[in-house]
Amino acid sequence: MTTIALKNVLAKAGLKVDPSEFLALVEDAAKRLSPPSPNPAHYFSAEQRAALQDVGLDLSPATDDDQDARARTVAAHAVLADSALTVGEAASLLGVDDSRIRHRLKEGRLTGWKAQGGWRLPAWQFTPSGVLPGLDVVLRSVPEDQPALVVAAFMSTPQTELVINGRPATPRQWLLAGGDPEYVAELASVLGTPV
């Protein structure tokens, strides 16, 4: 019964992965990302803690009521990795050669990380017909030391400064709606900076 529920959740999220494969990804991410310390905040400087907390990551110590406060982060890493595109998939989506994708990565016009088997490009930066409008402007402003998960969380978290129809919008929604990418770039430029 649990497998069917997980399969439904994955399908609704648009993730093309078998439930057992997804659970293996989560297990792998948990092994790699979960420190043995019951207080993960000890692993980060004050500035890094502020940046991670700003994008919604929970760095509080585990309590008896909450067996693992980091489960959401591990799941987010697993989803980010599973939904990421390969260079070939990105090239196919954009109708270009693989080398053009690697060139855009080098120029900072696309973002990604090197993994076993090659580059992985987070899906949030793509639309069904191409690249998120204004992406290059935003990526130029993201500090180089910000990990892919922080950038993904920022791009998918509503920001009070970006308002569409009277409601805070995510940077991705803002750009898709034709909003000025400079506003998003300004917000992105302070990722990792304490408030």
Image: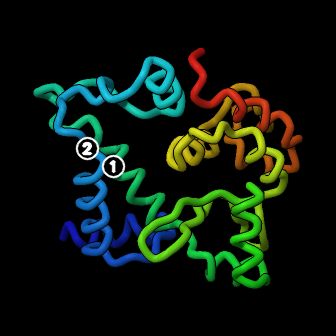
- The picture places residue 82, in percent across and down from the top left corner, at 44, 67
Q: Where does the N terminus fall, quadrant-wise?
A: bottom left
Q: Is residue 67 visible?
A: yes
Contact between marks 2 and 1 (CB within 8 A): the answer is yes
What is the x, y in percent for residue 86?
56, 75
Give the residue at mark 1: 74
Q: Given the image, on which type of amino acid does mark 2 rest?
A: Ser
| Label tally | 2
Secondary structure under tag 2 reads loop
> What percent of the width, then of the height, locates residue 68?
20, 38
Q: Which residue is mark 2?
A: 34
Q: Amino acid at mark 1?
A: Val
* Picture residue at 32% right of the left edge, 29% below the top: 43
From what the image shows, is residue 112 above or below residue 178? below
91 vs 11, left or right, is right
Residue extending farthest left = 64
**Residue at (77% x, 76% y) in the render:** 100
Compared to 26, does 102 lie above or below?
A: below
Location of the C terminus by quadrant is top right
Q: Nearer the viewer, residue 39 or 62?
A: 39
Residue 103: percent from left, percent from top: 75, 69
User: Is the residue marked by circle 2 packed among few (<14), some (14-19), or many (20+) residues within 10 Å?
Assistant: some
**C-alpha gap between disc 2 and disc 1:** 8 Å
Residue 116 figure quarter: bottom left
Q: Secondary structure at mark 1?
A: helix
